[in-house]
Image (tube, rainbow, N blue to C red):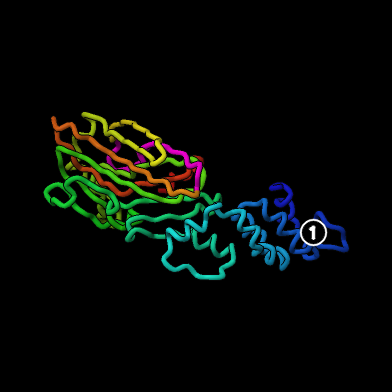
Amino acid sequence: MGSIFSSILADPDACLSPETNLGDLPESCVASVLEYMDPQEICKVAVLNRAFRGASYADFVWESKLPLNYESLIQKLFDKFPENLCKKDIYACLCRPNSFDGGTKKAWLDKRSGKICLMISSYGLAITGIDDRRYWNRIPTTESRFRSIAYLQQTWWFEVNGEVEFPFPVGSYSLFFRLHLGKSTKRFCRQVCNSEHVHGWDIKPVKFQLATSDGQHATSQCYLRDPGCWILYHGGDFVVENPTVPTKVKFSMTQIDCTHTKGGLCVDSVLIYPSELKKSLKRF
């Protein structure tokens, strides 16, 4: 299918007789073909002519791209959602990063695959000692999608907990903590990393845990390394089989060995992403 349309895009009239062209194809036939293409390909071929443009708005084409429980997603993400939108516009609305739970969380559809992605800010996490400015500070930054991170100067007891209840569509998901060793600042229009307070993370590993409302569990450990880089630390995977019931996911990150202090860590967010799209996470 992809090779056929590549040849059509290269020479729109190559596959047709001299008496016909792509504009002669009925919109219903074109729409039946577009149903098998991914959303970005549909948008590209929509510029070929009026028939393709009209077919690209067919509801059944875009309904095939939406998650089966997209109505539950709309109820979760929007207090008021515009009525009478075509399925293409619904898809476009869900592809935007939509905030919910007081702006502490964002969810969106991956534009190419239609899979759901979710991000939880540091404000949506329970961080031990976060209100004590001797240990933690909130720092505004353009390096976070939430424009703010939690920065740890020093502590003996490090614990970050969180949970989210969400109508995840069927699929496999991976959870990551987005962390940075050292305080990142701008100097002369360049990002620089101050590693003054970074210590203690190479003595004992950090423990990550995940549990879901249907009984799934995951546990892992690793040392935090590479100051100056935002790194996604894998916290575990889970599978959703029943999209009609919201899945509650509880997760944590701890290093509570009180034989030594640790500090110099930035906590940005927790990301839940479709497992098959892990490679695209490099853009974060």
Name the spot of residue 229 as percent of width and height, x first: 32, 43
Residue at the farthest left position = 134
Residue 234 is one of the magenta-drawn residues: yes
**Left or right position of 186 against 89:** left
The local crowd at label 1, few if under 14, some if 14 to 19, many if 20 or more residues have their Cα within 10 Å, is some
Task: Tell me residue 269's x, y (percent).
Answer: 32, 49
**Point 75% across, 56% down: residue:** 11
Quadrant of the rendered image containing residue 39:
bottom right
- Asked if 46 appears above or below 144 in the picture, the reply is below
Relative placement, left or right, of 38 versus 133 is: right
Nearer to me, 18 or 132: 132
Specify the quadrant of the image occupied by residue 57: bottom right
Residue 54, percent from left and from top: 69, 67
Q: Is residue 101 left or right of residue 205?
A: right
Identify which residue is drawn at 32% across, 41% down.
251
Residue at image x 79%, y 62%? 25
- Mark 1 lies on residue: 13
Whether residue 279 is visible to the viewer of this picture, yes or no, is no
Residue at position x 25%, y 52% in the image: 185
Task: Tell me, yes or no, whether the highlighted magenta stretch contains residue 89.
Answer: no
Q: How many labels sit on residues?
A: 1
| Image: magenta residue range | 225-243
- Res. 131 in view: yes
133 and 238: which is toward the camera: 238
Identified by mark 1, the residue type is Asp
Q: Position of residue 178 (x, y in %)?
A: 33, 45
Numbered disc 1: secondary structure: loop
